[in-house]
Image (tube, rainbow, N blue to C red):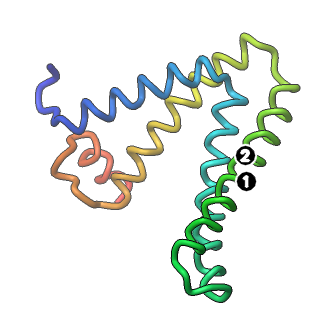
Amino acid sequence: MIEGFQPADYVLCGLAAVMAVTGLFRGFSGTLAFALATIAAFFAATFGWAYSASLTDVLWMRGAGVLVATLLAFGFVRLLVKKTVNCLLAQPSDALLGCLLGVILAALVLLAWARSGAYLEYSVLAQGLAGYVG
């Protein structure tokens, strides 16, 4: 055990390891496509929920419409990015860059946590980074 680490720090380190391994198997194109598709799905859900309020007042219909729009945005962006980037990279470099991108995404999760300032007492890593980001 590393001295001073909280349980949340071990979860963050485990998240970085899992994201690195999945990035290695997905490759750069798959990892980048997943990250960009997740962002597109978030925006589709946010704007879809706000827009659907003018169309109907029935919550389950709004939720179903937003779910369909979110899944379509996720699938379309993922397919587009994966096919485009996959044509540009050779297989070994794709896998290694995917591993690196997985670690970078895990670091961005830590950076977002430190930037938010929420529940920093649960993580030594987030507390240390908050001093630089804050």
- Residue most toward the left? 3
Amino acid found under the numbered disc labelled 2? Gly
State the residue lying farthest toward the top: 92
**Toward which corner of the image does residue 66 lie, by quadrant?**
bottom right
Which residue, given by chain and number where applicable, does mark 1 sit on? 72
Query: Considering only vertical position in the picture, is 132 above or below 67?
Result: above
Q: Under tag 1, what secondary structure?
A: helix
Give the SS element for disc 2: helix
- Residue placed at 72% from the left, 10% from the top? 92
Which amino acid type is shown beneath numbered disc 1? Leu
Residue appearing at x 60%, y 80% in the figure:
50
Residue picked out by circle 2: 75
Q: Is residue 17 left or right of residue 86?
A: left
* Residue 28 vertical position relative to residue 42 in the rendered view, above or below: above
Q: Looking at the image, do the residues carrying marks 1 and 2 touch, with CB atoms under 8 Å apart?
A: yes
**Above or below, 27 relative to 118:** above
Residue 94: where, in percent of width, then height? 72, 20
What label sits on residue 25 in the rendered view? none
Q: Determine the image quadrant of residue 22.
A: top right
Is disc 1 surrounded by few (<14), some (14 to 19) or many (20+) residues within 10 Å? some
